[in-house]
Amino acid sequence: MAKREKYDLEERLIDFAAIIIEIVRQLPSDRVGVHLSGQLLRSDTSPGLNYGEALGAESRRVLFIN
């Protein structure tokens, strides 16, 4: 059986956010590009931050209160 690589979701989410940032930098500076850039940055970079917060939660209850 082949040895599986460590599955590090936090690292993968950070890499994904970095890719999105590079894509956003290439969008045009017109109204549509600015609008889409803002949406992409907010929605596609937040999962990594949310995952980090969830890992730091003190209990399952804290996860669902915030």
Image (cartoon, rainbow, N blue to C red):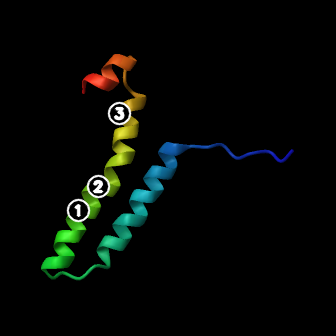
Query: Position of 26 compared to 9: left or right?
Result: left
Give the residue at mark 3.
Answer: 53
Q: Residues within 10 Å of mark 2 (few under 14, many from 20)?
A: few
- Label whose residue precedes the other's in the sequence (1 or 3): 1
Quarter location, residue 51: top left
Mark 2: which secondary structure?
A: helix
Q: What x and y, as percent, mark residue 53?
A: 35, 33
Mark 1: which secondary structure?
A: helix
Give the residue at mark 2.
Answer: 43
The reply to whether dot 1 and dot 2 touch (C-beta < 8 Å) is yes
Give the residue at mark 1.
Answer: 39
Q: Amino acid at mark 3?
A: Glu
Query: Position of 4 compared to 16: left or right?
Result: right
Which quarter shows the C terminus?
Answer: top left
- Label whose residue precedes the other's in the sequence (3 or 2): 2
Q: Amino acid at mark 2?
A: Ser
